[in-house]
Amino acid sequence: MQWYPLRLTTPIKQHIFGGRAIAQRWGRSGLPDGRVAETWEVSDVDGDEAAVVDGPLSGRPLRELVREAPAELVGRGWSGTRFPMLTKYIDAAGALPVHLHADDEDARRFEQQTNGKTEAWHILDAAPGATALVGVRPGIDREALRRALLDQDFDAVMRRLPLRAGQTLYVPGGTLHSFGPDTLIYEIEQTSDIQQHAMTWRMEDGSPLDETQRRANIDRLLVEWKPACRPVFHPGLSLPSNDDTQRTVLCAGPYFALERHQAGSAEQLAIDLDTAVILSNAGAAATLTAPHGWSGTLDRARTFLLPAALGRVEIDGPADVLIGYLPDLDRDIRAPLLAAGHRAAAIASLGEGLGNPHAAPGGA
């Protein structure tokens, strides 16, 4: 199969907390009228599977390509039945529901799913004073949390952290969280849509939940809650580059890594591939070139999925792109950051598995 950068269909979620920031402030074209809460840039979630929109593979579902050529598409001898990463732009014009996602163990035990949903947020834009609720304060036991959730008194038990553009938060499965209002983020996560929330209303349309269902939701949430999860925002760690380019590792763990690469107008970004890369544009439209004479434009707030078999792509500056991939934590993250002079503790703070030199790369 002759591969090329893949443009995919992007499911749109018009949840109650959404607004118009992705179109109006971030420059995304082609969105429907009304509120747009989420654009799912690369998705292989059941019921929201992406398909290729142009080129020789036009119309082919992503899941079909994953199953047909997993090593060529995802790379590094990977095998699985669906693409392992999900990415989104999220407009929290209003506050998201207070919720959590199961980790792998609880997803299999309680949700009949093969994996959980660890995620990370990269803050693209946030109004002055914007905050996020992330994790539960030390000393709060399950019964105290249950009472507060029933009373919707989230600040009595949760940590409220300030948000600033450019920061990133790695959110392990089992972490109770919310963010917004007035916040725009880029999210990368395991391929999953499982969640348990503590609200009195439905996220899709704001309609009220009956009390029996609300209490059942909170009880399930408490079963999947991990009390020790208290992640913190991180500015990322830089890697060496020339005067007109910048590479920052934003987060990393066993399921994904996220980096931000920036280049001036006279420079070119080169991306070497031995694993699939999700390439999303956080800046002005940029020209991308790939093997076999392929060339195309990556518009603002748009995404390409780069198959591992491409080997290398180049982006003409000026460019400001987000790069998500399945890391080998030692080779791709720990070793180059240590060589750049970053301390082991700072590297470990980027996510999970970085304190262990024998951590495994991401899998299905």
Image: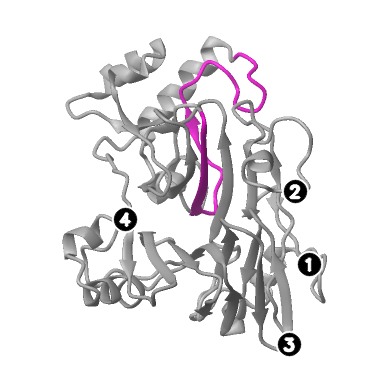
SS at circle 2: loop
Residue, disc 2: 29
Camera-side residue of 146 and 244 = 244
Q: Which residues are magenta?
A: 182-208
Residue, disc 1: 60
CA gap, disc 2 and disc 3: 27 Å
Q: What residue is drawn where x is 48% and y is 66%?
A: 262
Q: Is residue 129 above or below residue 7?
A: above
Camera-side residue of 321 and 324 = 321
Q: Would residue 43 be visible to someone looking at this image?
A: no
Q: Nearer the viewer, mark 2 or mark 1?
A: 2
SS at circle 4: loop
Residue, disc 4: 351
Q: Nearer the viewer, mark 1 or mark 4?
A: 4
CA gap, disc 2 and disc 1: 23 Å
Label 2 Cα neighbours within 10 Å, binned few <14 / some 14-19 / many ≥20? few
Q: Is the stretch drawn in magenta largely helix, strand or loop? A: loop
Image colouring: one colour
Residue, disc 3: 293
Which amino acid type is shown beneath numbered disc 1?
A: Arg
